[in-house]
Image: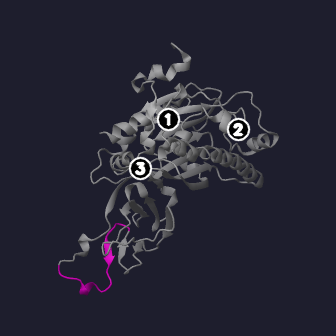
Amino acid sequence: MMNDAHRWLHEHPELGSGPIPIEPYISPDWYEREREKIFRKVWLCVGRVDEIPNRGDYKVKRLAAAETSMILIRGKDDVVRAFHNVCAHRGNTVVTETGPETFGRSKAAIVTCRFHGWVYGADGGLKHVPSEERFYQCFDKQQNGLTPIHLDVWEGFIFVNLAETPDNSLAEFLGDYAAHFAGFPFAELNYQFTYYTELECNWKVAHDAFAEAYHVDTIHAGSFPNTFSTGLQNVKLMGPHRTCAVCLTLGAKPTPVAGIANAIAGASLVTRRAETMLPPAINPDKRGDFAFELSVLFPNTLIHVSEGIWFTHQFWPIAHNRTLWEGRYYVREPKTNAERWAIEHAMTLQRNAWLEDTATMEDTQRAMQSRAKPVQNLQDDEILIRHSAAVVDTYVNA
């Protein structure tokens, strides 16, 4: 290697080494182009099949960036389908939303618009119209079902594409990313902690805060002191997606309580871990200091995996300077009170770390909007941010 301090530049010279502009983070016009060219056109991860496990279960997901909400519903045939949450009568939402995500269940596998009682089946068909005889001859129930949305599933993750005709299949969109994570037992680790909040920042500001380890020694000095190496390993760029390894600082000692919790449940990233469930593409050189795989699934989903743990961050744009952040953390369900205590301890540390991350984002947005600095200067281990900027620029200017 010519210069280890610039290793990722040498491996990916096409990304360049110069500063990147801040205008895409603060411009309302740029955000409108992102909505049109990205969030209305590419495959978006909107949930997991185990969120709606039974026939007739449904989930409504609001997507502000695409100006729609959608119904994800499991039919009597056990197939999960997606539809716009819009009634064919007067345009009301069929399922009333109670937040960014709304869950429900219908034994009959139907949803009913509360406005005038129109009933739709899980296949999207219009099943019943009150006072149907009062409508005119031109009205055809067969032509007025729910509007479908393209849906596909990978490793239990539900993806939708809002384009009338997607540019590619989900398999084509995921490409090498799918192979990289294939076989990881996501479904087996289903004991879940969920956090969400709205942040006054651009979605890319939120993304960037989680896409490097350069900040660990400063921002996480309280939660994870001297725990993680700030240099990324095994960086791979896979089309619009990207992944890398985050490693431990060997020899760092956890607090006495954390050490006990780690020995009981292993639910924290702050410990050396076995590798019985990792796919061969993850930590391929079997580094002894490997902690977890940090990956970005374009455009707005981060998936992290480790032995016995996986977690996600999703950054859903609400406006050019506002983002819905959703964080989910998964481990095996505890079998004893001691395991539950250890998992709760690990999640308390993780929650604190996430709060430390989010504490920087709104300050970043306000500072950027001053336009006092027109660019960001990135170092070599911020390559995931540099790649993200290049990919977004390519899509927006396509």
Q: Main secondary structure of the magenta part?
A: loop
Label 1 amino acid? Lys
Name the secondary structure under disc 3.
strand
Label 2 amino acid? Phe
Mark 1: give few (<14), some (14-19) or many (20+) Cα within 10 Å.
few
Residue 127 marker: none
Q: Residues within 10 Å of mark 2 (few under 14, many from 20)?
A: many
The answer to whether any part of residue 295 appears in the image is yes
Front label number (1 vs 3):
1
Q: Quadrant of the C terminus?
A: top left
Question: Of the residues under marks 1 and 3, which one precedes in the sequence?
Answer: 3
Name the disc covering residue 44, or none: 3
SS for tag 2? loop
* Label 1–label 2 contact, CB within 8 A: no
C-alpha distance separating marks 1 and 3? 32 Å
Circle 1 SS class: loop
Q: Is residue 386 above or below residue 24?
A: above
Reading the image, the residue beneath label 1 is 373
Is residue 266 rendered to the left or right of residue 231?
right
Report x, y in % for residue 147: 31, 64
Q: Nearer the viewer, residue 39 or 250?
A: 39
Q: Is residue 127 magenta?
A: yes
Q: Separation of disc 3 and disc 2 at Cα?
A: 32 Å
Q: Is residue 216 above or below residue 71?
A: above
Residue 168 coordinates in the image, percent (x, y): 31, 44
What residue appears at the point 42 percent right and 57 percent down from the top-left corner?
Answer: 63
Which residue lies under the disc numbered 2?
224
Q: Amino acid at mark 3?
A: Leu
Earlier in the chain: of badge 3 and badge 2, it is 3
Q: Relative to the observer, which residue lies in front, 324 or 57?
A: 324
- Is residue 285 left or right of 124 when viewed as pictured? right
Magenta-highlighted residues: 122-137
